[in-house]
Image (tube, helix red, strand yellow):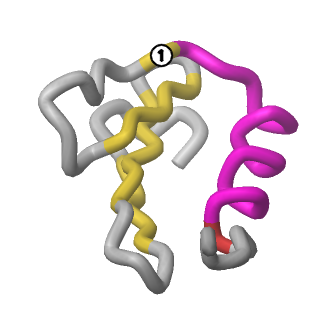
Amino acid sequence: MDGGTGSFVEFENRRGDVWRAEWHGAWFVAEWNTQSGTPRETDLDELVEFAIARLCDTPRL
């Protein structure tokens, strides 16, 4: 995706929460299934940590 302007990937956890990571000269991530899902700039290491944390999230009781 790096260098591919407009490239994106969406990912979803088992609860149906959806996020989108995009490349627009920098990395951006947004919660995709909410009205407040405004993309925010991030670096690649933070993006990977963010994705792992969201996809491996344990269910809330």
Q: Residue at x 23, y 23 (%)?
A: 36
Q: Residue at x 28, y 29 (%)?
A: 37
Report the predominant secondary structure element of the magenta stretch.
Answer: helix
Of residues 59 and 34, the one nearer the viewer is: 59
* Residue 5 in the figure: left or right of residue 42: left
Q: Residue at x 37, y 22 (%)?
A: 39
Residue 22, quarter of the rendered image: top left
Looking at the rendered structure, the secondary structure element under dot 1 is strand
Q: Which residues are magenta?
A: 41-54
The residue type indicated by label 1 comes to Arg
* Residue 35 in the figure: left or right of residue 14: left
Q: Dot 1 corresponds to which residue? A: 40
Of residues 25 and 31, the one nearer the viewer is: 31
Residue found at the far left of this picture: 35
48 in magenta: yes
On screen, residue 37 above or below 48: above
Q: Residue at x 74, y 24 (%)?
A: 43
- Percent x, y of residue 32: 27, 45
